[in-house]
Amino acid sequence: MTSSDKTGDAETTAAPRTPARGRPPSLLGELSAEFAGTMILILFGVGVVAQVVTTPDGSAGEYDSIAWAWGIGVMLGVYVAGRISGAHINPAVTIAFAVYDGFPWRKVVPFIIAQTLGAFVAALIVRVTYADLIRSVDPTLTETQGIFSTFPADAATIPTAFLDQVVGTAILVFVIFALVHPRNKGPAANMTPFMIGILVVGIGMAWGANAGYAINPARDFGPRLASWVTGYQNAWVTGDGVQYWWLPILAPIIGALVGGGLFKLLVDRYIPAEDAPQEVGRA
């Protein structure tokens, strides 16, 4: 997940790309990569939740396997798209890079559409593939909406869920900015996707209880829409009938802006230039 430079020519720091024949990728190429990368993310993420939910005896995994598979999905999605588009695969990340790191605003909406479509298509694939198992545990399609989208825990209020998503996404973007900053001596280019995947595993293990750690508007809205068009009539509301679909869109965007802003405030302005001398014994 990387930004692009201020001239509008995409520049990948997580996975530096070498475009074929020396030409930068077209916008269509970048959108194709964002679609594919997000699709891979959702195939693993929604796929593992479907597997766990439809095997309630725990024989095919429990919460830890969900956290790990989401992280693996992110890692592989970034590897898929990184050299072409920078592998944002998350509208909140795209917006944060536009606000703080010079990603061209003219690409923001197309990127978000591509990411959401990738998530939608992947969720449809999971929905069709797991249709028999889903029907076996939930014939009325009223108990397994959580396969596709997030909802607050029974004990969590809407304000708590909103704060949870702001905090989780702020952590995500803060650390991504640190990992891909060209002067921050982050991991080697081919290891950055791995570290971003580990980051998501950590968020899942620490910040999943309140609201399911969507931390990605495309990850939630695309599969939520796919579930609705395939029979889940209550996809947009909580079990109490409260409209919830908007929260995993708005709160992660706010969280991304908070996380990016905090990185700029607390870290970015203090990172020394590449050629700045380092004093021995100084922190």
Image (cartoon, grey):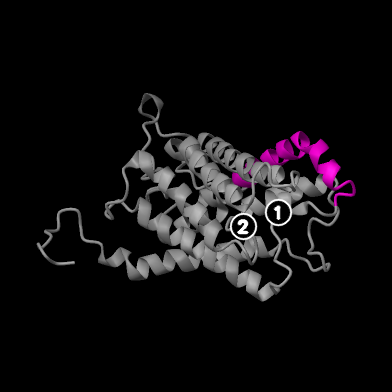
Q: CA distance from mark 2 to mark 1?
A: 8 Å
Res 263 quadrant in image:
bottom left
Residue type at the position of mark 2: Ala
On screen, residue 268 above or below 274: below
Q: Position of residue 271 (x, y in %)?
A: 25, 62
Q: Is residue 139 magenta-colored?
A: yes
- Residue in the picture at 50% in, 38% down: 76
Residue placed most toward the observer, 169 or 12 = 169
Instruction: Specify which label sits upstream in the sequence, 2 or 1.
Output: 1
On screen, residue 10 above or below 244: above
Q: Position of residue 94 (x, y in %)?
A: 51, 53
Residue type at the position of mark 1: Ser
Structural crowding at the residue carrying mark 2, measured as other residues with C-alpha within 10 Å and reported as few (<14), some (14–19) or many (≥20): many
Q: Which mark is residue 214?
A: 2
Residue placed most toward the observer, 140 or 28 = 140
Start-end of magenta stretch: 114-141
- Residue in the picture at 65% in, 69% down: 161
